[in-house]
Image (cartoon, rainbow, N blue to C red):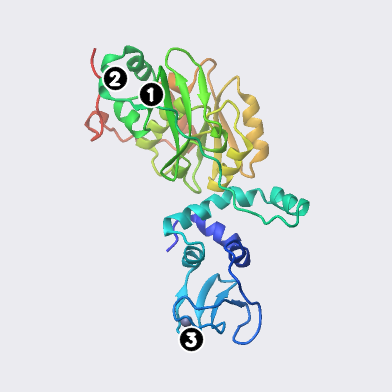
């Protein structure tokens, strides 16, 4: 039933009693009617029986009533005792990725203040600044915006796909996590000034699209991401994924999130000035880290399709019969408005 391997992993790590404590559920460890490996809870949510016939198995993490045979999976237990919808349970479990990775901080905190109960802290989110969606009309009327996207080979359907917005000469790139906006990056259209959401460094670009057990390409910025991602989506969809930390230097939180996504290896793509980040990722990540250095002065946006082809030929280690693909016929495709 559970399909997300990250959730399965989190559930494996969970202590059933921690969950019950977190939701202030009273349970009995032993006594009449309580089997080995179970804790008894009163009353039974199904039949209302209150002699500990309703019990939760600590190892296999399910609830069962020995009287009415009512049963709950861990998902339903959390939903029932935490008063959450199934969607919220999923989110609650996924948020534990950060929470559990910070186990050292957590233990330190508990030792420091024994009376303080460990509380669940979801990662902080940023609200988008006031903005408007980028429309076809805006591109037709405003040559700054139009040429910004043309220069970066971004089409109108990319703008829609990445949900780009604008505000006072700024382009806003929203950061999505599980279908919600959690942070953003903003770039001035006339110069290279960026401003970032406070918590941008806690998130990855399209983390939900990172594939388990497949190579992950880490690029330097969002615009690099769009270029490489367009290529990957056509020729390597379901084989390779791409992400970025948005910032010049990837944060430790972002590194933890990458590890939690379990790619088979990480390929850092950077220009010749950015060695430092490669070293940091290589030392911090317990998996294969490779790199691609782009020719001096080039970033992924300057690469021609053929140059990208060469790079990916090397990454995949196989010569590929390229599926010719007529982008113009794509359903969502709309060309840039003509001047
Ligand atoms: Zn019952």
Q: Is residue 185 above or below residue 30?
A: above
Q: Which residue is mark 2?
A: 138
Q: Position of residue 63 (x, y in %)?
A: 51, 74
Q: Position of residue 144 (x, y in %)?
A: 36, 13
CA gap, disc 3 and disc 2: 66 Å
Q: Which of the two residues, 95 or 42, is positioned nearer the viewer here?
A: 42
Name the element at disc 2. helix
- CB-based contact (under 8 Å), mark 2 and mark 1: yes
- CB-based contact (under 8 Å), mark 3 and mark 2: no
Locate the N terminus and report the quarter of the image it occupies.
bottom left
Name the element at disc 1. strand
Picture quadrant where residue 334 is located? top left
Picture quadrant where residue 332 is located? top left
> In this view, which residue lies farthest toward the right?
112
Q: Is residue 134 above or below residue 285?
A: above
CA gap, disc 1 and disc 3: 61 Å
Answer whether residue 273 is visible to the viewer in this image.
yes
Tell me if mark 1 has few (under 14), some (14-19) or many (20+) residues whose alpha carbon lies within 10 angstroms of its own.
many
Tell me if mark 3 has few (under 14), some (14-19) or many (20+) residues whose alpha carbon lies within 10 angstroms of its own.
few
Label ID, residue 67: 3
Name the element at disc 3. loop
Residue under the point 50% across and 27% down: 221
């Amino acid at each position: 039933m559970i399909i997300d391997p990250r959730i399965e992993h989190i559930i494996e790590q969970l202590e059933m009693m921690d969950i019950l404590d977190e939701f202030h559920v009273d349970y009995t460890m032993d006594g009449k009617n309580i089997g080995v490996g179970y804790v008894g809870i009163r009353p039974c949510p199904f039949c209302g029986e209150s002699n500990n016939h309703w019990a939760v198995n600590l190892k296999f993490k399910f609830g069962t009533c020995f009287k009415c045979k009512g049963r709950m999976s861990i998902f339903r237990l959390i939903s029932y005792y935490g008063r959450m919808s199934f969607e919220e349970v999923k989110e609650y479990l996924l948020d534990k990725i950060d929470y559990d990775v910070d186990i050292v901080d957590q233990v330190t905190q508990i030792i420091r203040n024994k009376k303080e109960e460990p509380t669940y802290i979801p990662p902080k989110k940023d609200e988008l600044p006031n903005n408007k969606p980028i429309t076809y009309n805006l591109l037709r009327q405003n040559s700054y915006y139009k040429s910004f996207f043309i220069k970066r080979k971004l089409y109108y359907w990319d703008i829609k796909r990445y949900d780009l917005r604008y505000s006072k000469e700024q382009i806003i790139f929203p950061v999505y996590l599980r279908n919600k906006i959690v942070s953003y990056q903003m770039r001035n259209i006339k110069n290279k000034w960026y401003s970032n959401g406070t918590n941008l460094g806690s998130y990855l670009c399209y983390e939900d699209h990172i594939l388990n057990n497949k190579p992950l390409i880490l690029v330097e910025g969002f615009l690099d991401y769009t270029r490489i991602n367009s290529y990957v989506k056509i020729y390597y969809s379901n084989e390779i994924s791409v992400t970025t930390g948005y910032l010049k230097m990837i944060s430790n939180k972002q590194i933890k999130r990458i590890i939690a996504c379990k790619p088979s290896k990480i390929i850092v793509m950077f220009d010749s000035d950015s060695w430092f980040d490669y070293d940091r990722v290589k030392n911090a990540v317990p998996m294969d880290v490779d790199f691609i250095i782009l020719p001096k002065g080039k970033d992924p946006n300057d690469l021609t399709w053929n140059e990208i082809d060469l790079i990916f030929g090397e990454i995949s280690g196989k010569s590929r019969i390229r599926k010719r693909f007529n982008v113009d016929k794509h359903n969502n495709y709309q060309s840039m408005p003509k001047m």
